[in-house]
Amino acid sequence: MSSSRTGRPPVQRAAKRPATPRPPGENPFLRLYTRAHKAWDRPLTAYYLILGGSLLITVLGLVMVYSASQITALQLSLPGSYFFRKQFLAAAIGGGLLLAASRMPVKLHRALAYPILAGAVFLMALVQVPGIGMAVNGNQNWISLGGSFQIQPSEFGKLALVLWGADLIARKQEKKLLTQWKHMLVPLVPVAFLLLGLIMLGGDMGTAIILTAILFGLLWLAGAPTRLFAGVLSIAGLIGVVLIKTSPNRMARLACIGATEPRSGVADCWQAVHGIYALASGGLFGSGLGASVEKWGQLPEAHTDFIFAVTGEELGLAGTLSVLALFAALGYAGIRVAGRTEDPFVRYAAGGVTTWIIAQAVINIGAVLGLLPIAGVPLPLFSYGGSALLPTMFAIGLLIAFARDDPAARAALAMRQPRFGRKRAGGTRMNRGPRRWNTMRRRASAARSSGER
């Protein structure tokens, strides 16, 4: 065998494997679909969709809150970043709540259901006490915390109904009581009507609609019979019609569905029409971040209920479709978590949270598009408002915890290795061997040890 100039034997390269021919009739699109389906069906898909989707919505929401609220802040003689700083503080606190909720065991979530419900009912009743509760935009649903900070207890009522309702139905399912209609309805429906009554005392019809959607979602997941479900829906619909008919403001909002021009009279439809103007002027890619025209006093509530319209004007159709895609991914992941679990509490809680977020997003976006009446509900994780952001981020933490609790997801997370070095084991550093780094210096020292100088 011939040797090289350095005296070392030549390196023998392994023969290349022959390329396996593809089947002549294989469709490349079918192969791509198969790979995508396998990647989509991985155990951690729901976990990454919930975590990544919620974080992207929150970050994009912070950017749009800063852009949409600058003019409003300056008109109020406040710094341009005033609303952004408050929203950023709420997002930081909400991030802590999300992390805490994602690390809690399911038993602790169930134990928190009753305290959260009792606290929400107490605060919602406290809103109606003169001198404590305060009205914002005609709705008596706020409590002042001092200075410019306020809290809306009805937002925490959504979280309370999800946790308490899921725990209640899960306990009854374990005792096989859900086959009787009285156990299906009592005490879930009376407590839900109590929360709805406290909300409607303040005149907040939008939050009441979201709470009703959560109630129907829990009943649907519990397997309520069609007649029972239709009966509860009919009663709720009748109450809603009465509340709308007896309020000129709500009738005016209903009359603005599909409006394209401002009108004179009670139903002027100014906000609904200028929301359409903002979306129409955005085009495909928008006028640019910060370049909205409607936020200069033409569009009321530009950074809260109608932030989706400003997003369409500045980021265009591409931006709005991106927001819709993120909410669709979040909804799919929530449904997947609820459908694959064997724990009844996880199923009902995940279904309740998903119903809450998606129903609120649909109602908000539908109002901006002129397809639904303006209900005054924020876009979850996106609009300005700390009272809405905090319980929503805690609910996202619930979904993350449930996604991690899946047996296949737990096994996949346990198999993950750290990127650098060996996996840490128990004991001190003296019990672990030194880390070996595959660097150029290490390869060079190995070469010199063979005798070459």
Image (spheres, rainbow, N blue to C red):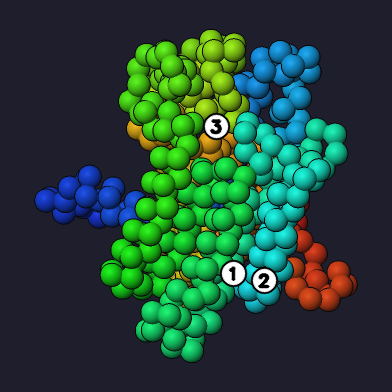
Q: Quadrant of residue 394?
A: bottom right
- Which mark, by number, is residue 305? 3
The residue nearer to you, when weighing 233 against 323, is: 233
Q: In the image, what residue occupies the spot 56% across and 74% down?
A: 167
- Which mark, by number, is residue 114? 2
* Residue named by callout 1: 164
- Measured in 3D between alpha carbons, the distance from the residue under mark 1 to the one under mark 2, in whole angstroms, is 6 Å
2 and 3 marks in contact (CB < 8 Å): no
Residue 21 image offset from top left, x and y in percent: 21, 52
- Measured in 3D between alpha carbons, the distance from the residue under mark 2 to the one under mark 3, in whole angstroms, is 31 Å
Q: Is residue 94 left or right of residue 282?
A: right
Can the viewer see residue 391 in this picture?
no
Q: Say which label, 1 or 3, has the lower sequence index.
A: 1
Q: In the image, what residue occupies the spot 47% across and 55% down?
A: 212
1 and 2 marks in contact (CB < 8 Å): yes
Disc 3 residue crowd, few under 14, some 14–19, many 20+, Cα 10 Å: many
The three-letter code of the residue at mark 3 reads Asp
